[in-house]
Every structure is written in structure tokens, then in C-alpha cells.
Amino acid sequence: MTLDEINRGPRSQVRRALLACADVPRWADAICDGRPYPDEAALVDRADRLAREITDDELACALAAHPRIGDRARGGSTEAAWSRQEQAGVMPDAELVEVNQAYEERFGRVFLVCATGLTTGDVVAAARARLANDDATETAVVKDELRKIAVVRLQKELDG
């Protein structure tokens, strides 16, 4: 979508596009409520600021929309295509499977990282480092990773 389409498009259509960026309804609604935006930078800035306010419950719901890192999202949705693109440099291997399992056992959720531009080694190193976090620290890190993903995807949406 272009900035003009986001500013003037039907709320339901814009909201659907935003939910593909981050499956957080309150975030998408707040961005819609802020229309019109004078430029892309203002839109992205608002999206970034609002994503910093994601609650624990919203995080849990949003994580349900993310495949395990190294797994390829299936389907033809925009979100699935973005996920495959973002994880293009991440190839599943035994070490990645092991660290995913350790992370899920430790924190009870999938490991989330903004994988754009990362290799398998980068992801494994990040996961291993984050296994040392306490629950509160890790929740804050995951929220920030979700924020990064949302902003990257919004920029992709604007770039068409």
C-alpha cells in the first residue's frame, strides 16, 4: 500500500495490511486512528512508538502468528511471504533445532528474532545468549524484536 492508500483507504483494508505486519489489533487500530499521516516517516515513527507499548497478552497473541525460526511459513498470505523472505538466510540445522527446543522449554514460547539479514549462525548465537535472560528481561527483548519486525514489514508494505 502507498501512503495515500493507508491515509484514505477503507479502514478494514488498512487494518488487515497492518495486522500482517504485527498481529496486534490495538496497534493496528491506533495507527488507523492516527490517519492521515503527512509522510511515510511520520507513519513509521507512530508505528514504532505504538509497538513499544505492546502488552504481554498482545505479545502472546502476536507470537501465535510467527513460525518457529527455521521453519518456512506456508501459504500465500503476505505475512507468510514476508516470513519466508525474512528467514531466507536461515537454514534449519541440528544446532538451530536444538536451540529452538531449549528456548521453548525455558520460556514456553517460540524464539522470536528479527531475522532480516541474519544467518543461521547469527540466530543460533542470539538464541544461546538470550537463554541466560530472566523471564522479564526476555519478555522485553521479545517485544522489541516484534517491534522491529512490525516496522520492517510496514516499510515493506509502503515499498510495495
Image (cartoon, rainbow, N blue to C red):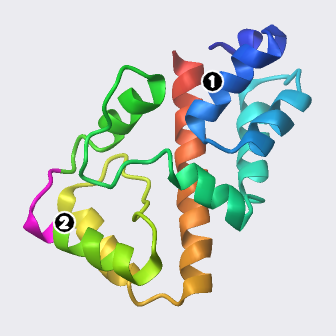
If you read the primary sequence from the N terminus, does the residue marked by circle 2 or circle 1 appear first? 1
* Alpha carbon distance from label 2 to label 1: 31 Å
Horizontal relation, residue 138 to residue 124: left or right? right
Please give left or right for residue 135 compared with residue 58 in the image.
left
**Residue 72 vertical position relative to residue 103 in the rendered view, above or below:** above
Q: Label 1 belongs to which residue?
A: 17
Q: Is residue 100 left or right of residue 139?
A: left
At 24% from the left and 52% from the top, the residue drawn is 70
Q: Amino acid at mark 1?
A: Ala
Residue segment shown in magenta: 91-96
48 is within the stretch colored magenta? no
* Residue 149: percent from left, percent from top: 52, 47
The residue that mark 2 highlights is 96
Q: Residue at x 41, y 63 (%)?
A: 110
Where is residue 67 shown, x and y percent of the image?
37, 48
The kind of secondary structure element at disc 2 is helix
Residue 92 falls inside the magenta stretch: yes
- Contact check, label 2 and label 1, Cβ < 8 Å: no
The residue sitting at 38% across, 38% down in the picture is 83
Q: Quadrant of residue 77?
A: top left
